[in-house]
Amino acid sequence: MTAEVPIYDIVGVGFGPSNLALAIALAEHNAGPGEPVTAHFLERQPRFGWHRGMLIDTATMQVSFLKDLVTMRNPTSEFSFLNYLHAAGRLVDFINHKNLFPLRVEFHDYFEWAAAKVDDVVSYGTEVVSVKPVHDGSEVAYFDVEASDGSSLRARNLVVGTGLRPQLPEGVTAGERIWHNSELLFRVDALRDADPKRFVVVGAGQSAAEVAALLHDEFPRAEVCAVFARYGYSPADDSSFANRIFDPDAVDQFYRAGEPVKDRLMRYHGATNYSAVDIDLIDELYRRVYREKVLGVERLRLFNVSRPVEVTSSGTVTVESLTTGERTVLDADAVVYATGYRPADPTPLLGDLGARFLRDESGRLRVERDYRLATDSPLRGGIYLQGGTEHTHGITSSLLSNTAVRVGEILQSIVERRVVAEPAGEYAVSAR
């Protein structure tokens, strides 16, 4: 039989903050005098959600509210965090708070508020299962996006924003007692009636410190053992000059730099984001450790300059000191790995198209300045990445800091490169 397949200028794979910001940029573009850009987004979650497992009540954002979904691109946008506060009746209260960094739960509520305004362009509960090229002669003219519900969309351009994937160390397998910090709040609820005696938290970054603090609060009868290779938690470098690495202009500078300079910049400024903790949280954890030493009951134990060398599925962890080689065996109710995330690899999803992508000497995908994947022969449209471009565009690749500017650049690229082959809203007939 035959079925009509809608053709869109853009099909977005995933609908996290990055593609949400793109949907907003599209809405603002289409409200102007220019030719409309048609788009639809597919999101496997049943509703908008962003790191829900780490929405700790007391945790704050590590980025200014001015780096929201729109302000750096369009300061007058109705989708700004300030407009959200006004709508929620908290604008005056927030101003009196004198703080650039909102609660994480509040910023998530802002995301949901913004997502509700553009929910006509997204299908939730719909996972992309494959992308197939559609040829016009030897040229790839479109991309057919097949979804888990059996539907299909035809795209002139793809924007892949599938986010990050939780990362566990090599050899570690997730299980009932071993899990990544991204599951924290879901797991904590299940543990409340179990009266746990000990947790082991592996990692030295912001998430690891937040996990240790929350478990220490929530389970006053349990011991929390933090294991990391450093002497202590290191503070994030959020000084004014260092923060210039997040400026939009820094993306241009990083992109043009040679590989040795890129490597050097990442080493210089890794402390702005990686394995770094807010100084207030460091101070709070140190106060807890010291207070417990005074009281003679040490529930928060730091195994610094150490590493876990063996972890069993039952939760037994062998911790080795990196300086002495001494080993300590800890029986834990749960082992939480706060060991970061990795970008989702788009190539399996893109199937046969993957063979066309160009790679650098290290096997990494080559990406154009406009976030378009470089291919061995031209595509009529483009495949754009939101994330997974740290090696080409710098540290802001997966961060909120440059999201508003990045989506504006992607939209501008699509508009400028668009070849108007069919009128907007036309349908293609596909054999099914």
Image: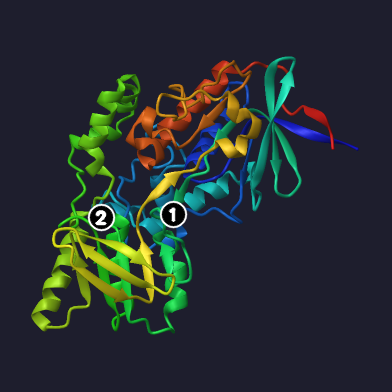
Locate residue 21, reporting x and y percent. 49, 39
Locate residue 425, reporting x and y percent. 74, 29
- Dot placed on the residue nearer the N-terminal end, 1 or 2: 2
Q: Residue at x 42, y 67 (%)?
A: 178
Provide the residue designation for mark 1: 108
Q: Amino acid at mark 1?
A: His
Between the C-alphas of marks 1 and 2, the distance is: 21 Å
Quadrant in the rendering for residue 227? bottom left
Quadrant in the rendering for residue 197? bottom left
Locate residue 180, reporting x and y percent. 41, 60
Q: Residue at x 53, y 29 (%)?
A: 384
Q: Which image quadrant: the C terminus?
A: top right
Q: Is residue 156 left or right of residue 108?
A: right
Q: Residue at x 82, y 34 (%)?
A: 4
Label 2 Cα crowd, 10 Å radius (few <14 / some 14-19 / many 20+): few
**Given this view, does label 1 or label 2 mark the residue nearer the observer?**
1
Q: Nearer the viewer, residue 263 or 116?
A: 263
Q: From what the image shows, is residue 126 above or below residue 295?
A: above
In this rendering, does residue 87 appear at all?
no
Q: Secondary structure at mark 1?
A: helix
Quadrant in the rendering for residue 387? top left
Q: Secondary structure at mark 2?
A: helix
Q: Residue furthest right?
A: 1
Mark number, residue 96 = 2
Locate residue 6, reporting x and y percent. 75, 33
